[in-house]
Image: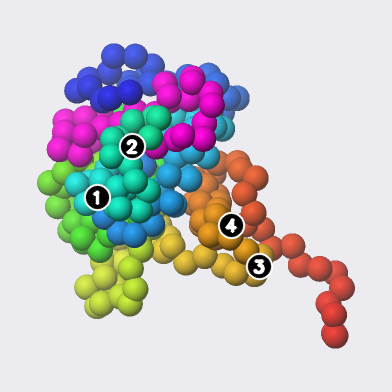
């Protein structure tokens, strides 16, 4: 589903559709840092659980999706090939990044949080300095203004001093800095398990239930203790 300039149905301007007892409306931004798998898995997991996703992809984010996932067109079929439920397509709203008049750029548009994953240093700096020249950064700024959860999954290492200052300023403004640093205490054996660890962390921050493996379960018996 493509975006329009104003609300035309429940998925754009009104309350989320009653597909769950407590469905959420989440804004997802994809910028040009490595980590397309994180974004695609998050979108998939939100949709299959009945939540509504508003997606905006920067120009370099489009390049990222092509380079890392072979995606040439931003549509439901290409972004979510594993989802068989056709109704899920109605819960995915894709907004052009140049459309700064889209609904997600307005504070009057109610949602339950925004995630930028992956978040490049360029997008991080633009959000930190309120440089809303495109829809992704503008939607993030509005999310901060309205005191809604903003989760920035920065994917860069090492950090320069400017990145660290941007971290500080964004944290003070209310953003959650969530670098894509997976844990290995669950002993992952595949890339998919590593991706799921981070996606589960993001969903925890969004207060979205999931069954991805992220929990540490400490054994009552420690060998050699």
Give the Cα separation between the discs numbered 3 and 4. Answer: 9 Å
Q: Nearer the viewer, mark 4 or mark 2?
A: 4
Dot 4, how many residues are within 10 Å of its Cα: few (below 14), some (14-19), or many (20+)?
some
Q: Classify residue 108 as left or right of residue 38.
A: left
Q: Taking the image as drawn, is residue 201 in sight?
A: no
Residue 16, magenta (yes or no): no
Residue 115 x, y percent position in the rendering: 38, 47
Residue 193, labelled with which disc? 4
- Label 3 vs 4, first from the N-terminus: 3
Q: Secondary structure at mark 4?
A: helix
User: Which residue corresponds to the image point at 83% horizontal and 77% vertical from the top-left?
Assistant: 222
Position of residue 193 relative to residue 163, above or below, is above
Residue 158 x, y percent position in the rendering: 33, 77
- Label 2 vs 3, first from the N-terminus: 2
Give the Cα separation between the discs numbered 1 and 4. Answer: 25 Å
Q: Nearer the viewer, mark 1 or mark 3?
A: 1
Position of residue 79 relative to residue 150, above or below, is above
Q: Which residues are magenta?
A: 79-108
Q: Secondary structure at mark 2?
A: strand
Residue 180 sits in quarter: bottom left
Residue 154, labelled with which disc? none
User: Which residue corresponds to the image point at 43% horizontal and 24% vertical from the top-left?
Assistant: 89
Residue 156 x, y percent position in the rendering: 33, 68
The residue identified by callout 3 is 187
Q: Secondary structure at mark 1?
A: helix
Residue 55, labelled with which disc? 2
Give the Cα separation between the discs numbered 1 and 2. Answer: 16 Å
Residue 63, labelled with which disc? 1
């Amino acid at each position: 589903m493509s975006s329009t300039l104003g609300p035309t149905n429940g998925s754009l301007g009104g309350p989320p559709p009653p597909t769950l007892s407590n469905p959420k409306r989440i804004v997802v931004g994809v910028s040009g840092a490595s980590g397309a798998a994180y974004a695609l898995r998050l979108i998939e997991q939100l949709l299959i659980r009945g939540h509504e996703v508003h997606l905006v992809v920067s120009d370099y984010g489009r390049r990222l999706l092509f380079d890392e996932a072979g995606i040439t067109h931003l549509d439901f079929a290409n972004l979510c090939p594993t989802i068989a439920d056709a109704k899920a397509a109605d819960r995915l709203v894709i907004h052009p990044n140049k459309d700064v008049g889209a609904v997600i750029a307005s504070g009057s548009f109610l949602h339950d949080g925004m995630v930028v994953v992956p978040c490049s240093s360029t997008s991080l700096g633009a959000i930190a300095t309120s440089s809303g020249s495109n829809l992704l950064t503008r939607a993030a700024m509005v999310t901060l203004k309205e005191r809604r959860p903003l989760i920035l999954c920065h994917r860069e290492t090492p950090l320069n001093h400017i990145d660290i200052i941007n971290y500080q300023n964004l944290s003070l403004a209310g953003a959650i800095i969530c670098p894509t640093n997976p844990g290995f205490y669950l002993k992952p054996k595949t890339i998919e398990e590593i991706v799921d660890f981070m996606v589960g962390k993001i969903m925890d921050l969004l207060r979205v239930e999931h069954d991805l493996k992220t929990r540490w379960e400490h054994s009552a018996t420690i060998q050699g203790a």
